[in-house]
Amino acid sequence: MAGRGKKESRPLYLDVADRIESLIVRGEWRLGERLPPLATLAAHFGVSRAVLRESCSMLVGKGLLELRHGDGTYVKPFAEDAFLRPVHAAVLMGSSDARALLEVGMWLEKGIASAAARRRSDEHCRALSEALFTMETGVGDLSLILKGEGDFHLTLADAAGNPTAANIVRILYHPLSGVLRWLGAEEKVQREVVALHRALHDSVVQMDEDAAERHLAMYRTLLRERISERREGL
């Protein structure tokens, strides 16, 4: 039979789409970042612009990229509201989802904290100090606590030296910060958060991996405990 045994070739645009997705997952392009022009990407992958457009269209359909007319193609950022609504609802309804989310964050970030303590640079230490200073001077102002906490954890993820892990932290940051936003209105909680970040900061600066991992776990555990207390008071 004619053609029997002939292997069908995979469309080229699918291969290119896979390569682009792999670069995003590895952190080569981060959430919200603009991709190079189509002509540059086409030359980089050795394909025509038509093939590159088809690849990007496929990734737009998957929700990985977004096309901004007249501006270019971007790695699609995750919508904060889409994450915060289920997290807040979980807390208010007495579900265990928010605590489970914090546990997932703890599992991931314990390894990140340990690696950051081992690999951090002087520049990372300065960035952590600046984030901590924002938190310390921001007690009483939840927006500053949230900003400092976010900068601290994203810097910690970068210091760990694993782009994939850093990308996952960036994805998880919105729901995790949603929990802190819900709990952090109380100044007592803010002070507890700052104190644990001071201990975590010092552990990383001193390159104490065990202490960094321990203080990270203590922070996420603190938030889980405060969720339980808040639910009991509803």
Image (cartoon, rainbow, N blue to C red):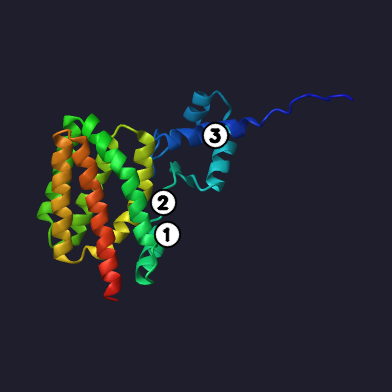
Query: What residue lies at 59% left-to-right and 31% top-to-bottom?
Result: 15
Q: Disc 1 designates what residue?
A: 82
Residue type, label 2: Phe
Residue 79 in view here: yes
Residue 97 in which image quadrant: bottom left
Cβ atoms at labels 1 and 2 below 8 Å apart: yes
Mark 1 Cα-neighbour bin, 10 Å: few <14, some 14–19, many ≥20: few
- Residue 22 vs 135, above or below: the answer is above
Mark 2 Cα-neighbour bin, 10 Å: few <14, some 14–19, many ≥20: some
Q: Which mark is residue 78?
A: 2
Cβ atoms at labels 3 and 1 below 8 Å apart: no
Residue 159 in view here: no
Q: Distance between the residues labelled 2 and 3?
A: 20 Å
Query: What residue lies at 27% left-to-right and 34% top-to-bottom?
Result: 115
Percent of width and height locating residue 226: 24, 64
Q: Horizontal placement of 103 versus 215: left or right?
A: right
Residue type, label 3: Asp
Label 2 element class: loop
Cβ atoms at labels 2 and 3 below 8 Å apart: no
Mark 3 Cα-neighbour bin, 10 Å: few <14, some 14–19, many ≥20: few
Q: Horizontal placement of 198 versus 2: left or right?
A: left
Residue 1 in which image quadrant: top right
Q: Residue 18 carries which label?
A: 3
